[in-house]
Amino acid sequence: MQINGHTVGADGPFVIAEVGINHNGEMAMARSLIDAAVDAGADAVKFQSFVVEELVTASAPKAEYQEGSTGESQREMLEPYELTPEQHRELQSYCSKRDITFLSTPFDSRSLTLLDDLDVPAIKIGSGELTNIPFLREIAETGRSMIVSTGMSTMDEVETAVEAIRDANPHVPLALLHCVSLYPTDIELANLRAMQTMDDRFDVPIGFSDHTTQIETMGLAVAMGATVVEKHLTLDRSLPGPDHEASLEPDELDRAVDIVRNAERAKGSPEKRPVGDEMDTAAIARKSLHATTDIESGTTLTADHVQITRPVDGLQPNRYDDVLGRRLAESLALGDPITEEVLLD
């Protein structure tokens, strides 16, 4: 999967800074959040795209974690956060100016059409849409790369969603993100090992959408194989709004992205071998076989004749058993290295 020139996996983890609705309906705040994502080294910044009357009914209640926000209903709460098409274009343009990928999550068909018209490089699908099979099909039919979060879902539900996407468009690029839809998520509930189960089941990139408040969790996910990671970003967790509490502030995101990049660098290769200048260290730290005393030519070596000491100028200690019982081709002095050249067959 490629997103705006970034090959997911081969080019390292794709880091998404999730603004969502943390702009609080203010374009200046949205631009500041984009700046913070750029400064942190994120690859993309993501918003949420919705038409309120198409997303929720007038009487839809808020989730428990949203109760502290303004508005009596979910619709009233969300109305201030709805971005107009022109605001979408302004944010996309500002992202282009700051050289960061603009992404958004659509929650309805009109918003999907808008993002398709904006030619976004990928569509991010929220966990709440995983069982919305008609919408998943509609997104797949655009042919745009799909990044699908899987919070609140069973493996059977994920499989059903993937099958629907593949039936609608067998060739659409797809990534799946493990996610826990609790805001915030306690670290012990992150369940990162579920990524390994998903990786075994699906032949697509696997990642993690992180709602913990710890800065390390995304890096841990990358160490366990995540190729796409996502974290909510806020300018200040004390701001009013439903998602600020489960978000990182700019300095925290900066550290979190550093951990992600270091985790990727630390993963290295599956091959077990010396790396870098390790063999220079081995020349000092390892030992080899040496004579424990003066030994005459023709002597059959026993354990009393052989010691394992530094430096590495004789045979490796793993040849110790091979050396015992062999005769010397020449005399050795105390401390001389025992090499293949001084041994008879």
Image (cartoon, rainbow, N blue to C red):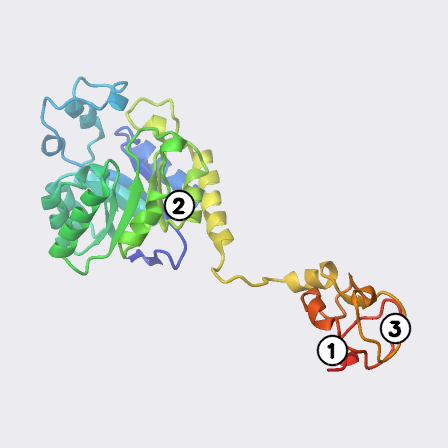
Q: How many marks?
A: 3
Asked whether disc 1 touches disc 2, contact meaning CB atoms under 8 Å apart, the reply is no
- Nearest to N terminus: mark 1 or mark 3: 3
Crowding at dot 3, Cα within 10 Å, few <14 / some 14-19 / many 20+, comes out as some
Q: Which mark is residue 295?
A: 3
Q: Please identify, in this view, whether the residue under mark 3 or under mark 2 is nearer the observer.
A: 3
Is residue 220 or residue 87 the one in the foreground?
220
Residue 339 visible to an observer of this rendering: yes
Q: CA distance from mark 1 to mark 2?
A: 56 Å
Q: Residue at x 39, y 27 (%)?
A: 236
Residue 166, horizontal then vertical, whole percent: 16, 55
Secondary structure of the residue carrying tag 2 is loop
Q: Quadrant of the N terminus?
A: bottom left
- Kind of residue at disc 2: Ala
- Kind of residue at disc 1: Glu
The residue that label 1 is drawn on is 340
Secondary structure of the residue carrying tag 3 is loop
Residue 34, horizontal then vertical, whole percent: 35, 40
From the viewer's perspective, is 302 left or right of 191?
right
Task: Check the image and report above or below for 166 versus 34.
Answer: below
Q: Residue at x 34, y 27 (%)?
A: 244
- Nearest to N terminus: mark 3 or mark 2: 2
Is residue 22 or residue 217 the one in the foreground?
217
Q: CA distance from mark 3 to mark 2?
A: 67 Å
Q: Please identify, in this view, whether the residue under mark 1 or under mark 2 is nearer the observer.
A: 1
Asked whether disc 3 touches disc 2, contact meaning CB atoms under 8 Å apart, the reply is no
Q: Please identify, in this view, whether the residue under mark 1 or under mark 3 is nearer the observer.
A: 3
The residue that label 2 is drawn on is 42
Is residue 105 or residue 265 the one in the foreground?
265
